Image (tube, rainbow, N blue to C red):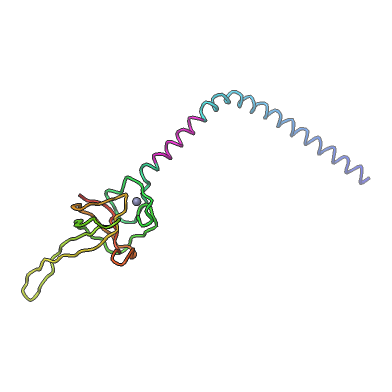
């Protein structure tokens, strides 16, 4: 009896499977018909999409994909660079103080000297004394500031004995 029952259930299962298969065939045939209709269109579309993607990638590389350094910058660099000490394309994080000054020397390799002046109050005489600050800053190749440029520099980790600032943009 048990065998018969199992046989019956098997038969039922087979029937069910057959019906499912038939439905699938019907759907498949209709899908195939749709696919065959769309196939030439899809073939025509695919290469166009591929070309667009590559174009986008190329633009991305050209523009340099400057990283957001966390400081609002009006003129981020348009060119890319492979400098590890670049805040936009390398691994250098920028934190701390930000100054604006004039580049007075670009003789260093990937470095500039930035100078700015400020007023120091002398309470005894109720007057101000004009003082100067000079700071050596890293000059990434994508920014490439020269003598005479007005630049904005931001504090970073010490990059050498004297450099712990990096030029983040050229203002003039
Ligand atoms: Zn860079």
Residue 14 appears in which quarter of the rendering? top right
The part of the image, by quadrant, that contains residue 71 is bottom left
Q: Is residue 9 above or below residue 113?
A: above
Residue 72 location (% of width, % of height): 29, 53
In the image, residue 25 lies at what x, y percent?
Answer: 71, 29
153 or 26, which is in the foreground? Answer: 153
> Which quadrant holds the N terminus?
top right
Q: What is the magenta range?
A: 47-59
Q: Is residue 47 above or below residue 138?
A: above
Query: Residue at image x 13%, y 69%?
Result: 120
User: From the viewer's perspective, is residue 162 above or below residue 172?
Assistant: below
Magenta span main SS: helix
* Residue 53 % position (x, y): 46, 36
Q: Is residue 50 magenta?
A: yes
65 left or right, relative to 172? right
Q: Quadrant of residue 151?
A: bottom left
Q: Residue at x 51, y 28 (%)?
A: 45
Front-most of residues 104 and 61:
104
- Residue sitting farthest toward the left: 125
Q: Is residue 28 left or right of residue 170?
A: right
């Amino acid at each position: 009896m048990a065998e018969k029952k199992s046989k019956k259930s098997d038969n039922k299962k087979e029937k069910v499977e057959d019906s499912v298969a038939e439905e699938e065939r019907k759907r498949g045939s209709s899908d195939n018909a749709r696919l065959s209709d769309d196939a030439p269109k899809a073939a025509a579309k695919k290469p166009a999409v591929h070309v667009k993607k590559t174009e986008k990638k190329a633009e991305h590389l050209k523009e340099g994909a400057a990283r957001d350094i966390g400081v609002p910058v009006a003129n981020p660099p348009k060119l890319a660079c492979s400098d590890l000490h670049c805040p936009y394309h390398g691994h250098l994080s920028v934190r701390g103080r930000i100054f604006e000054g004039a580049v007075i020397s670009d003789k260093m390799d990937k470095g500039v000297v930035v100078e700015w002046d400020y007023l120091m109050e002398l309470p005894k005489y109720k007057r101000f004394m004009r003082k100067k600050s000079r700071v050596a800053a890293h000059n990434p190749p994508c920014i490439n500031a020269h003598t005479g440029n007005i630049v904005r520099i931001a504090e970073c980790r010490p990059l050498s004995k004297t450099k712990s600032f990096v030029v983040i943009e050229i203002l003039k």
